[in-house]
Amino acid sequence: MLRTVTTAAETAPSPAAGGDLDRRIAKLAIPALGSIAAEPLYNLADTAIVGHLGRSPLDALAIATSALSTVAWLAIFLATATTTEVARNTARGEQAAAGRAVGAAYAVAVGWGVVTAAAVVAIAPLLTWLLGGQGHSAAAIGPAATEYIRISALGLPFLYLSFAGNGHLTGLADTRTPLRIAVGANVLNVMLEAALVFGAHAGLAGSAWGTVTAQVVAALAYARASRRSRVRPERPVKPDIAALLRDGHRLSVRTIALGLVPLAVTAVAARLGPVPLAGQQVANRVWYLLSLSLDALAVPAQVYVSAALGTGDTDAAGHAARRSLVLGLYAGIGLAVVTAALAFCAPAAFTADPGVRHEAMIALLCAALTQPLAALAFVYDGIILGLGDYVAMRRTMIIVIVAFAPLAGLVLRFPWLGLPGVWAALGCWLAARALLLARRWARAMAVPASP
């Protein structure tokens, strides 16, 4: 039996509740980490298992997962927009409106997922080519990446349903149920992949099938949890779906701009050679998983800010934002130390190739320096999502590409800059994101009536 969830209204922060608010932020953020990390954990398991098949499969996986991650992000609005709508409506006591918002998210997840899966299957060779998969001397890399993309595309509708369910439960301040689902799905994923790759000798394709199966199971678990939640999904009306699609359009444009940078990183690394590409794949997966603990702090920021603004309490919203930022910065500094320490041992878990290990170590040492910047950028993401200003988020993500592009171009022009140059470009990108979103929040607090 699932536990009874708590509404956002019941957990809305008080401006004076310093230590108590910190505990409530941690209570949401720690379980949220598990659900947020679900998809990256799939990819991390893929990398760890496939890495032992050799350099070429690892290169193919790097290209395939970069494309698939971007496609997955295009539907992340099903989680983020739903979280804000559910938190605000439950804070106002409008349970029916919250239920219709959830119903709209599930309906869009099904339609969007099926169409996207079909499109990805059709254009998989093009995606592989755009990311440099045809430029290697090992001719198997391109076809292997294409096959992985096509198999994994079958799991997209189920992944999108999980996004909708996650947004529903998180908006109700329930992050423990998503944690249980994420842990169960990832344990299943690892077991299936190990059996298919090493037991059945299915290679890279076996890794993809294991992940798809885990995504199906996770989607079914979210659907069951939604039916048992305090605010159940309701049949949406056209305005509910239109509102979600409108928010989705704004957030998807933002997501496309956000996804261009990781795609560009993979494309740049691919043109540096197969060894830097494989090293970047290992480093990026480790960094991404660690940085999600910072992104988890965006969840309470979004929930508490949206709930407080839903009741007109701007003081509580400001207090929740400040505490989330402070805790995020502390976590970012701590993770910088952890990332640097892992640089000397983590690559060995992914590959036996000494060249790839060396490149991954260098990349992780550079990545460690970006963790505090990631903390500020991610938490401000949650704050602005709570504010509901998706236009500002879209504009910011488009503008900050300018902060990334010059250094990335220099790496292509001067390949000796290598992966340190790539991570310097990523650091500039994260810093620009944090700065622009901070300015938007400052304006919102200066003029509370104009969110």
Image (cartoon, rainbow, N blue to C red):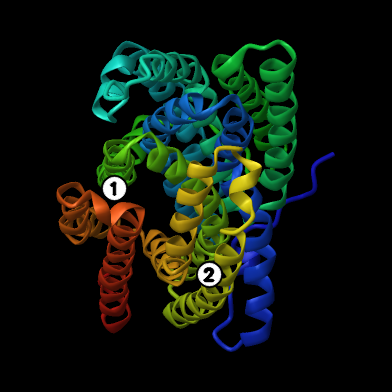
Residue at (75, 15) in percent of width and height: 199
Please, what secondary structure does the residue beneath circle 1 have? helix
Query: From the viewer's perspective, is 86 left or right of 35?
Result: left
> From the image, which quarter does the C terminus lie in?
bottom left
Residues at discs 1 and 2 in contact (Cβ within 8 Å): no
For the point 59% across and 51% down, the residue is: 170
Q: Earlier in the sequence, mark 1 or mark 2?
A: 1
* Residue 177 rendering spot, x and y as whole percentages: 71, 45
SS at circle 2: helix
Residue shown at 58%/28% (left/top)? 50
The mark found on residue 336 in the picture is 2
- Residue 305 position, x and y percent, is 47, 68
- Location of residue 238 with respect to 125 vertically, above or below: below
Which residue is identified by label 1?
261
User: Where does residue 334 sit, x and y in percent of width and height?
Assistant: 59, 73
Screen quadrant of the N terminus: top right
Mark 2 nearby-residue class (10 Å; few <14, some 14–19, many ≥20): many
The mark closer to the camera, 1 or 2, is 2
Q: Is 195 situated above or below 81?
A: above
Amino acid type at image mark 2: Ala
Q: Residues within 10 Å of mark 1 (few under 14, many from 20)?
A: many
